[in-house]
Image (cartoon, rainbow, N blue to C red):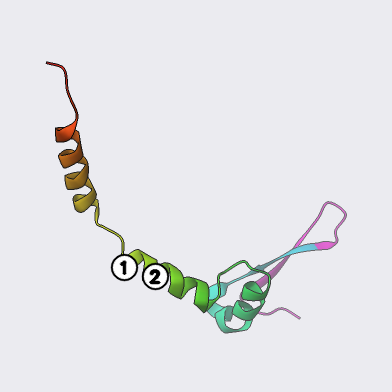
Amino acid sequence: MRIPGIKFEKDAHGNNRYVRIDLKKHHEAITPFLKQVGSIPDNEAEDAFEKEFKECITGNELREDVIEYLKTLPWKK
């Protein structure tokens, strides 16, 4: 039976080897499986990343810090 958004791919011997799944169509059905096998992180891991990311400095802040540090080095003229 053909289901839109799901395609079986065969190996050289004609056996089904891979499944191509359109995530836009079947996102709700496949997401639990992908989380179970570790292909996508669970919400706890995502939340920890987002929390850490929000506490990071910006690129401009980093640049300013590096410039200030470079000014303290004993440069030879």
Quarter placement of the C terminus: top left
- Using residue 24 as the reference point, say whether residue 49 is left or right of it: left
Which residue: 39% across, 70% down?
50
- Please identify the quadrant where the N terminus is shown: bottom right
Q: Please state which amino acid type lies under the numbered disc 2.
A: Glu
Which residue occupies the extreme bottom position in the image?
A: 28
Q: CA distance from mark 1 to mark 2?
A: 6 Å
Around disc 1, counting alpha carbons within 10 Å, would you say few (fewer than 14), some (14 to 19), or many (20 or more)? few
Where is mark 1, residue-wise? Answer: 54
Residue 58 shown left or right of residue 20 in the figure:
left
Residue drawn at (63%, 72%), measured in percent from left and top? 34
Residue at the spot 83% in from the left edge and 51% down from the top edge = 12
In the image, 6 versus 60, the foreground residue is 60
Residue 46 part of the magenta-drawn span: no
Q: Assess disc 2: are there few (<14), some (14-19) or many (≥20) residues with their C-alpha within 10 Å of its C-alpha.
A: few
Q: Position of residue 44 (x, y in %)?
A: 51, 77
Give the residue furthest to the left. 77
Expressed as whole percent of the image width and height from the top left, the position of residue 76 reads 16, 17
- Circle 2: element type: helix
- Residue stretch in magenta: 1-16
Amino acid type, residue under disc 1 in the picture = Lys
Disc 1, disc 2: CB below 8 Å? yes
Q: Is residue 3 magenta?
A: yes
Find residue 49 and report its image quarter: bottom left
Q: Quadrant of residue 23?
A: bottom right
The residue tagged 2 is 50
